Amino acid sequence: MIQISFILNGKKVKLETDENRRLIDILREDFSLTGTKEGCSIGECGACTIIMNKLAVNSCLVLAGQLIDSEILTIEGVSENGKLNVLQENFLKYGAVQCGYCTPGMIMSIYALLLKNNNPADEEIKEAIAGNLCRCTGYKQIIDAARATADTDMITDLSQ
Amino acid sequence: MKKDFSIVGKEVIRQDGLEKVTGTAMFADDIVLKDILYGVMLRTTVVHAEIKSIDFSEIADNKNLTAIITSEDIPGAKKVGAIKKDQPIFCFDKVRTSGDVLAMLVGNNEKEIKKLLTKIKVEYSELPILSNSSLAMNEDAPVIHEESSNNLICEYPLRKGNVEEGFKNSDYVIERSYSTSYQEHAYIEPEAVIAIPLEGNKGVKIIGSIQNPHTTRSVAASVLGWPLAKVRVEQAELGGSFGGKDDTMNVLAARASIAAVKCNRPVKIRYNREDSILESYKRHPYKMKYKAGFNVDGKIKAMKIDIIADGGAYASMTPFVTWRSVVQATGSYEIENVETNVKGVYTNNPYTGAFRGFGSPQPVFAQESLMDEIAEELKISPFKLREINGYNSGSVTASGQILNSHEVTLKKVLAKASDESGFNDKWEKFSKDRVQKDFIIGSEQREKEFILDKEQFIEPENVWRRGIGLSCSFRGCSLGAEGIDAASVFVSLQNDGSVYLHSGLAENGQGLRTTFSIVVSEVLGIPFEDVFYLGIDTGYVMDSGPTVASRSTIMGGGAVKDATEKIKRNLLDVFIENYNIPQIARVEFTNGMVTYDKYSMSFKDLCKLAYNKGVNISAVGWYAGPNVDWDEEKGQGNAYFTYVYGCQVAEVKVNITTGEVYIENITAVHDPGKVINLLGAKGQVYGGVTQGAGLCLWEELNTIDGKIKHQNFDELLIPTSKDIDNIDVHFVEGEEEYGPWGAKSLGEPTLELTSAAISNAIYNATGVRYRNLPLNLEEIVLNRKLSPASVKRGSA
């Protein structure tokens, strides 16, 4: 067992857990943050994508020990006080959601991209979500939503 | 008169979007219950064997183990199946395929009970493995199900005219063979289900990622030996299905229910990706032989088709899947003489069943490739050949059905796709640009000469070859003569004008609840936001058949319109009585107002008035398909009550050195009848085209002696965001009498056309015809597969 503390969706949290527990399990089981989804458990599908220290990572590949002093943002931290973020709004407006299972991971990957580069080219958007599999949408409307969000200056670092 | 719509046909944001973008949508595995137990599967290690014994003695006393569930715990049906009851919930006599399950361990610590699986000793007596569907009907083939004398699941003949005479009277006769591979549904959410025992004699409640709750209910009830009403099934948010969360989920729900009742505690089963790929069914691999006779003028005179579909170890939907194939195998062309034989056979391979397209993507690939091969023989353009042979209004299909009850839009979609993509000019240009002499791909010679000679050096600018290809299809809407076809909804208006909507068909992510709510909103002239679709629960709504066959909009939408119009008539009576206006008055329901001449009342007030007068403002809607018929021996009849038409054009570039095919554009033109939600309709096309491209180019799922090689997304490649540059969608709305305002089907036609269009484009680019999907790198470069089953390692 180890004691860890980290920032989760802007709040400092403390936890005692097994060193080899996966971040996805900590989020879903210990914090009831079930918006982060599991699809493959090997870092291929991206459904479990969260933002860790401003980078999009697969939470199924992060172990408890790596969390020490990190900043974690999950889908639950993207909308503030029940108000949708502009990226979420655009996901709705452009029809980027069908079954919705890949959606949280998709949003986190695009969010991380826009944090770093708020005016990405289409190729950069495609690259940013190349590790997020979606079986419903054919990606087109997801890319449309990302493009519409770029350059809005509405993406801010919510993880602190 | 063309109707003006207030919301139908516009871009409407999906009703269930908010919870999905905030991560609050509750998928089955997100549901947390007190005292829950988990079930984990003891899976076979062999493919085909008699089970001699299962020894649990080493784990029997383990503190983590609450129960061991085997076939002996099943009070009711030990085998289930949509058409043939041949699939065991737990194997007890034999294992027949690598995904088979022998027992389930139940306990509160999932991780710990998984560890116990290796301590169970199973003794098998192995049997010969049948993995080649072509050998399934041989005399000496191992028989997969002892109760049958052979491995035949189903056989459909179709006879029209005289095919031998037709070949005799043809100027040309060609024969070609095509094949397709497995396709995994690859819904991103793996299977999950919870069974909750209810108090007293109330039975059990099942919540899960279930495509067809009523089907799951009947399977679970039959396994429990209970009446249907004692089992209630509720759909959790469904993380993708595409036809895939049917049989597998029914079996899992039955297993969870047996355990829940035995332990008197909720039991959850949740699969990881490996479990999912191992146990779930796939799209059928098809082997197809086509023989076509045609004349110099381009007219196809005769077609003979032989198809074998690999059903795997269990029949599942094979009889229905292959029936659609026999109806549609000649494609959207009028051919005088047709002989088609389609067989579904058992093997020890993974079992196959329903998958978006449902027996159409395979024959469309073959037959639309064949069309281009015929065009090539005749030296005419693929467009022209389709113009010559394509269906018109009044054409007669292969099954003898006259297409006269709806607008036959084949030529319209063909013209639109061709115009939008600039097909004819590009096709001519790329055909001329094609230079074959400097480098030959897809040949035996190429395989022997991996290292190029000096003079074979390819200039970097010559590496990519561009091509364009098209494909057309017609598709029967809904179930057709394969089953009972009716759908039901319950619509109840509240006294403030808001609406509850219960549907017997299920949201699968495709946008059904939004579509249905739009129908209510349009009929009553009320805001879309006032309609609340309640999740599907078998306790609250009638069995409407499965949410399959692209039938939700036409059938379910029809039922929603029926229910809403019934309520509207009651409201109308109240309005007329209130103002004492003529019975025949043309009263308008628009923008939340009800108006006639100078009389006007808000919709809300009218609801309140009706409610206060004790008038019923709820209704059950019902929509039953018109009669269809089928002669099993001749394969003739009115197979479906209406059809949709589509045409896709693919533009690709092919890297002739690596075999990479990059899709630059797909122009997809579909006639779904009236479009209800434009945003959702486009989404269906983008998604279907992408899955169709996956089937064509990348998705390879190999088996070695019946065992699946690719068990996760590291090896099983599905399309990513980087694989298709653009998809261009257009709708042609054909006139139709059925469905809400003539809305028909869209989900499946979008997928079935793509692989043929791409393959034809590759031919246009390279001059090489590929007939075996998927067209991955090795197929393009070598024109053969490098899958373990086709390669002897170490051989030259």
Image: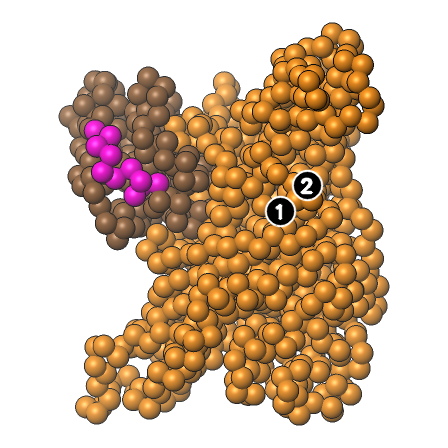
Chain colours: A brown, B orange
Residue placed at 75% from the left, 79% from the top? B337
In this view, the residue in front, A13 or B669, is: B669
Q: Is residue B528 left or right of residue A80?
A: right
Q: Which badge, 1 or 2, comes first in the chain's sequence?
A: 1
Q: In this view, does A35 lie to the left or right of B291?
A: left
Q: Pinpoint residue B501: horizontal percent, then vertical percent.
A: 64, 26
Residue B100, above or below A52: below
Q: Do labels 1 and 2 share a chain?
A: yes
Location of the N terminus of chain B (image quadrant): top right
- Please identify the quarter of the rendering in which residue B168 is found: bottom right
* Residue B730 covered by magenta stretch: no
- Please identify the quarter of the rendering in which residue A11 is found: top left
| Disc 1 packing (10 Å; few <14; some 14–19; many ≥20) | many
The reply to whether residue B284 is in sight is no
Mark 2 sits on what residue? B740
Residue B609, above or below B451: above
Which residues, given as a range, are shown in magenta? A145-156
Dot 1 amino acid type: Lys
Location of the C terminus of chain B (image quadrant): bottom left
Chain letter of disc 2 in the image: B
- Please identify the quarter of the rendering in which residue B547 is found: top right
Q: Pinpoint residue B352: horizontal percent, then vertical percent.
A: 60, 57
Mark 1 sits on what residue? B674
Residue B632, above or below B257: below
Residue placed at 44% from the left, 47% from the top? A137
Secondary structure, mark 2, is helix
Chain letter of disc 1 in the image: B
Q: Pinpoint residue B318: horizontal percent, then vertical percent.
A: 67, 58
Residue placed at 63% from the left, 90% from the top? B296
